[in-house]
Amino acid sequence: MFTGIVQQLGTVISNKGHVLTVRAKFGKLPKGASIAINGTCLTLVARKTSTFTFDVGPQTHRLTNLGSLKKGDRVNLETPLKASDFVGGHWVSGHIDACDKILNRGSLKNGFVRMRFRLPSTIKPLVAPKGSVAIDGTSLTVTKTGRGWFEVMLIPETLENTTLGYLEPGDRVNLEADLMARYVANILESRKR
């Protein structure tokens, strides 16, 4: 479980499709530790000083933007939540619901940015104004929705400390709907059966 508060930006060292290696500044992390990379929960399989290697399974490769990462790309990183930790964002599972693209990006006063994303039909019922969504692992509040899209407002702090500050229209991002919305939708769906 994660919070969607990105702890640091890492750099892709290599991406061989099923094996991803990232440079980062983490303390002691044991083999088998979970790390969210662009919001995707992966298991640490090897470590050398400041490089961390993860296996990327076929389904993860298919459902996320991890397969398209190239050497030198930045990635959002977060270690798992401890039971005693402060939840500054929202509960994020690291299980990506969809991967879709940025439709447009608009600069606003005082360094703020509005970003619009395509909203896949598979998660449309789970995304609502003032609800939470994780975009590449970053906990954000949905500000507006429309036919096939949703928007968020990014503050300068988020733009500076996550990959969202570097992304442009057409780039693909990992989307995870709010965990509570998932459960509510599942309860409502089960009542129809």
Image (spheres, rainbow, N blue to C red):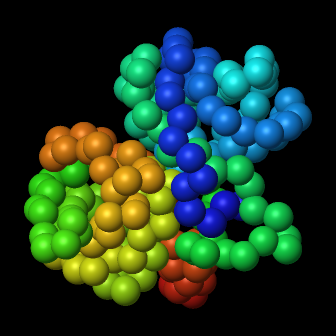
Give x and y (percent) for residue 52.
Answer: 69, 25
The residue shown at (67%, 22%) is 51
Relative to 70, residue 133 above or below: below
Q: Which residue of the protein is positioned furthest toward the front in this rendering?
A: 110
Relative to 169, residue 25 above or below: above
* The one of 190 and 10 positioned closer to us in this rendering: 10
Give x and y (percent) for residue 61.
Answer: 50, 30
Quarter containing the C terminus: bottom right
**Left or right: 2 as drawn, with respect to 158:** right
The answer to whether one can see residue 189 in this image is: no
Determine which quarter of the picture holds residue 37.
top right
The residue shown at (33%, 76%) is 142
Give x and y (percent) for residue 132.
Answer: 45, 76
Determine which quarter of the picture holds residue 71.
top left
Give x and y (percent) for residue 12.
Answer: 50, 24
**Left or right: 136 as drawn, with respect to 57:** left
The residue shown at (51%, 41%) is 9
Relative to 83, residue 67 above or below: above
The answer to whether one can see residue 8 in this image is: yes
* The one of 176 and 139 positioned closer to us in this rendering: 139
- Number of marks in the rendered image: 0
* The one of 40 and 26 positioned closer to us in this rendering: 26
Quarter containing the N terminus: bottom right
The residue shown at (23%, 80%) is 144
Determine which quarter of the picture holds residue 44.
top right
